[in-house]
Image (spheres, helix red, strand yellow):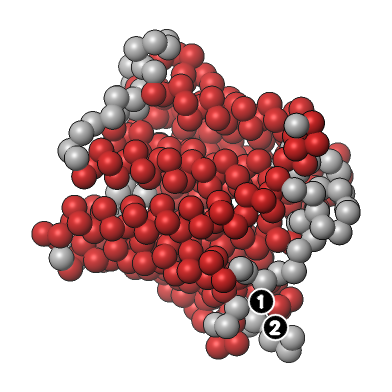
């Protein structure tokens, strides 16, 4: 048992990727069952609020934590939380997921406090090695996490009765921040992973496109929570779609299609572009705003995080960077889930319940495959004997 805990809490990606996979299956199973059976689940957030909050501050925050805790140790050469501190941080995240199911037994303020503590604790865990090493270039992740925590606070302030009308802007601000993080980190790692895997391939980059792809998403993120579906938001979304689409074209090579660990990342980033296209169409009145969310969530976040967890877990356990055959199936399933939830209802609205159920089932299958393949990888020592 001690050996298991030493391995599991050796580096941030291990517990948080495992928890993200488990929670992805449980969360979607609960949501799909309630939706199909038209039966509400009693939670601190309410039913719909719980689903949206937990997809962002539950699943996505776990993936972000695992990725950043691992990356910052690589960037700085300094230790991020491991052992007991990492176990405590993981337990804090778990408590935030469980407590909302007991709204009658637990004081609301306590549930809010526990959930609100995680992101600041994560930010402090990253700030210490970043400041200690002088890594100013990557220090922006700390204020980004602070704004992410602020978005969470807005939601809790409305639930606790301190203000009205803050939960929706809080959710959209958090979602936009995750998309911004994807755009920033995607621009770093997707071309890098492509170059590493394919000799002779050099993804094209244009400085002005790099700045515009990030700047337009920042502008969109500032405007969208407070002026949803306005013309201004539509313009910002259009710029984001165009610049990130050009960026994606510059990275393209047909040689990545035989490599699942590459095409899943490129397709995941493509869903971000699709999401911004839908936002533009919604601002023009051509698409209902309700259909602009899930290209980002199931597609951009779901596809990219599944691919990133698969790739990072192999690289940081000393294994060859080749996806197991079942993972290629999982990558295909999660993309089909995005199509079923993010695009199909636009054209066949009368089949929305069926598409929701289908998307949830495909999502669950994809992450069940991830757990089957990667649980042994995440709980066992590196095969090369190195620490981490």
Label drawn at residue 194: 1
Q: Nearer the viewer, residue 39 or 54?
A: 39
Tell me where residue 236 sits by quadrant. bottom left
Kindly give the residue lying farthest to the front in the view shown: 1
Label drawn at residue 146: none
Q: Position of residue 100 (x, y in %)?
A: 41, 24
Would you say 371 lies left or right of 50 here?
Answer: right
Q: Position of residue 288 (x, y in %)?
A: 19, 58
Residue at x-position 62% and y-position 27%: 91
| Total tally of numbered discs in the picture | 2
Residue at x-position 74% and y-position 86%: 199
Residue at x-position 42% and y-position 29%: 154
Kindly give the residue lying farthest to the left in the view shown: 350
Q: Residues within 10 Å of mark 2 (few under 14, many from 20)?
A: some
**Residues at marks 2 and 1, CA–CA distance in whole angstroms:** 6 Å
Identify the element where label 1 is drawn: helix
Q: Is residue 99 visible?
A: yes
Q: Residues within 10 Å of mark 1 (few under 14, many from 20)?
A: many
> What is the quadrant of the N terminus in the image?
top right
Residue at x-position 57% and y-position 83%: 258
Would you say 342 lies left or right of 113 here?
Answer: left
Residue located beneath label 2 in the image = 198
Q: Position of residue 372 (x, y in %)?
A: 56, 54
Assess whether mark 1 and mark 2 are in contact (beta carbons under 8 angstroms). Answer: yes
Q: Position of residue 33 (x, y in %)?
A: 28, 41
Does residue 378 sit above or below 188 in this rendering? above
Identify the element where label 2 is drawn: loop
Q: Is residue 233 visible?
A: no
């Amino acid at each position: 048992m001690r050996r298991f805990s030493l391995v599991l809490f050796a580096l941030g990606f291990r517990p948080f990727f495992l928890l993200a996979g488990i929670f992805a299956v449980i969360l979607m199973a609960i949501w799909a069952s309630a939706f199909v059976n038209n039966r509400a689940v009693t939670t601190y957030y309410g039913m719909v609020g719980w689903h949206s909050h937990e997809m962002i501050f539950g699943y996505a925050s776990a993936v972000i934590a695992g990725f950043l805790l691992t990356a910052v140790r690589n960037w700085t050469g300094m230790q991020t939380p491991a052992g007991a501190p990492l176990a405590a941080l993981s337990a804090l995240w778990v408590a935030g997921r469980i407590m909302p199911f007991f709204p009658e037994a637990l004081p609301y303020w306590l549930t809010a406090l526990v959930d609100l503590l995680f992101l600041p604790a994560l930010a402090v865990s990253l700030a210490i090695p970043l400041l200690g090493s002088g890594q100013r270039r990557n220090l922006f992740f700390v204020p980004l996490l602070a704004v992410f925590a602020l978005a969470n606070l807005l939601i809790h302030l409305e639930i606790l009765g301190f203000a009205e009308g803050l939960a929706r802007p809080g959710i959209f601000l958090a979602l936009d921040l995750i998309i911004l993080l994807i755009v920033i980190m995607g621009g770093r790692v997707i071309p890098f992973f492509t170059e590493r895997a394919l000799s002779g391939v050099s993804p094209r980059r244009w400085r002005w496109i790099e700045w515009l792809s990030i700047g337009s998403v920042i502008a969109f993120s500032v405007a969208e929570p407070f002026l949803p579906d306005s013309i201004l938001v539509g313009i910002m979304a259009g710029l984001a779609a165009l610049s990130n689409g050009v960026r994606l074209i510059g990275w393209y090579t047909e040689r990545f299609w035989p490599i699942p660990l590459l095409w899943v990342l490129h397709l995941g980033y493509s869903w971000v572009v699709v999401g911004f296209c839908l936002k533009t169409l919604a601002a023009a009145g051509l698409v209902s705003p309700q259909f602009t969310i899930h290209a980002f969530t199931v597609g951009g976040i779901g596809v990219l995080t599944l691919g990133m967890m698969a790739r990072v877990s192999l690289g940081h356990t000393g294994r060859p960077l080749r996806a197991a055959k079942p993972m290629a199936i999982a990558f295909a399933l999660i993309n089909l889930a995005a199509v079923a939830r993010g695009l199909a209802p636009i054209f066949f609205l009368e089949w929305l319940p069926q598409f929701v159920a289908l998307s949830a089932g495909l999502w669950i299958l994809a992450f069940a495959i991830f757990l089957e393949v990667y649980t042994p990888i995440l709980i066992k020592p590196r095969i090369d004997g190195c620490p981490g």
